[in-house]
Amino acid sequence: MNFNQKVGQLKSNHINIDNVLGSAIVSLLKSNQFYGNILVRINRIEDDKLKQPLGLTWHRHQIYLLYSESMISKIGDSEALITMLKHVALHIIWLHPAIYYKNDLATQMGTDISVNQYLDQVPQHAFTLKNVNSYFNIKLNKNKKSKYYIKNIRKIIKKETKKPNKNSKKQTLDDHKQWGRSSGLTKSEKANQLKKLINKSWKNTNTKNRGNIPGDVKNQLKRISIRHPIDWKKYIQIGLGNISFDKIDSRARFNRRQAWRMDLMGQISNNMYPVNIFVDNSGSMGDLEISYLLSEMEDFLNHFPTLISLYSFDTEIHRLKSNNKHIDFKRIGGGGTRFQSIFDYINNHKNAFGNSLVIILTDGYGEHELKYYHNNNILWILTSDIKHFSVNHPCGKIITLIHNQDFKDLVRGDN
C-alpha cells in the first residue's frame, strides 16, 4: 500500500495515523531529504488537544513533534500533509520553537509568513505575505526574518482598529502554543539543541539534495552552523584507550546510508564501556557552560553503548539520576571545590569503579595536592587555561576547551 492509499483510508479508520505520519516523513526523505532528515530524528507524541494537525513542544530537554489524530484524519490529501511537515521543519531551521515564547497573533502570523515563503505550494487558509499585505493594506518586504514581520504586524494591530476577524479562515498551519513550554532549558540551550539537530540532518543530506534547498535557507544554515564541534570521540578515546568501535546490525537505529529505507537495519556498537562523569558544582561554573558540555558529551556517548554514572561535586559527592540516553544535570549545593572528594568516593566504592574511565568537568580551581589511590584512568576537561589548573601534579590526561570556538561563543553569549 503506497502513501496516497494510506491517506485515502484515514477517514475510515482502517490504518494507524502514526504510521501515516511516518510514511509521509519517508516520502519527504525522498523528495526533500534535508527536511525529512530533520523530522525523522524527532520523536512523535499524539495530542488531540491541538488546534492544528501538527505542532512542536519541549519535553525533558528535547523537541517533540505533536500530532492530532482527529485533525490529520480530516486532511485526506498526501501533498497537504507533506507541505505541513515541510512547514514544521522550516520553523525548526529558523529556531522559532526556541526563540518565541509568546503565542500572540503577531507572532503566529510573522513566523508563518517567514517560512511559508519557502514552500512550493501554500494552502489557501495559511498566512502568507500576499494575503497579510492585502488585509492590512501594507507593503511588507519578502524574504525577511520573522522578527521583521512580527514587529511590523504588531505595530499595525496596535495602531489600527481593524484586526483580523476571529472567524477568519486564515490560520497557522501548525500549533505554536507549546513552543514556550518549560522543559528545564533556557532559550540559548533550546537553540543549541535545535542547531545540533539541524547540523546532523544537513551532514546526512547528499550533495544532490542539498542543491534543491532555497538560497535563503542555505544562508540560515550558515548562520547557525556549528563551526568547531567538540571532538568527544578523540577526547574520550584518550581515556578509554584503544577501544574497539565494532558494530552490529540493529533496528534501534535507521540505516544512515539509505535513511528512506525504514526496512533496513542500522548499526550500533558491540561493546559496553562504563563512564563516570563528575561535574564541578561550585559557584564558579556557569549553568550554561555545564549544560553545553553535558549536551555535547551526551551526543557522542549515545553513539555507542555506555554505562553512564553521573555525579556532581563541590566539597562532597552527589550521585545524580542518569540513563544511557540522557544526561540530566541538576545543581546541588554549589559551594567551594574539593577534588579530593572525588577520589575518596572512588576509593570507598572501588569494587564498583574498578579502573573505569573517570571524566571530571571543571574550571580547574581547587586544591593543590591530591591522593589518587592508584587511580590513573582520569580525563580532566577544563573550561579554563591549563596553566591556571590548581593541581600541582595531576594524574591522567588534561584537555582545555578554551580554544574551542563554539565554547568561546557560548561564554561570550553569542548563541
Image (spheres, grey):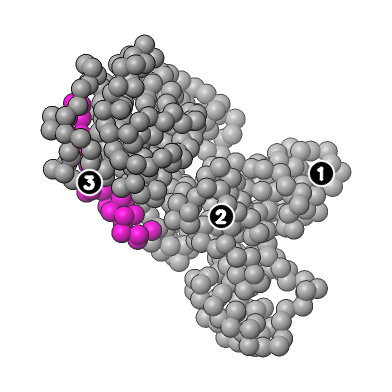
Task: Answer with mark 2 or mark 3, whichever residue precedes in sequence.
Answer: 2
Q: How many marks?
A: 3
Secondary structure of the residue carrying tag 1 is: loop
Neighbours of disc 2 within 10 Å: few (<14), some (14-19), many (20+): many
Q: Which residue is mark 1?
A: 9
* Placement of 362 over or under 287, stated as above or below: above
User: Mark 3 or mark 1: which is in front?
Assistant: 3
The three-letter code of the residue at mark 3 reads Ser
Residue furthest right as drawn: 12
The three-letter code of the residue at mark 2 reads Ala
Quadrant position of residue 378 = top left
Residue furthest top as drawn: 351
Quadrant where the N terminus is found in the figure: top right
Quadrant position of residue 157 = bottom right
Neighbours of disc 1 within 10 Å: few (<14), some (14-19), many (20+): some
Mark 2–mark 3 CB contact (< 8 Å): no
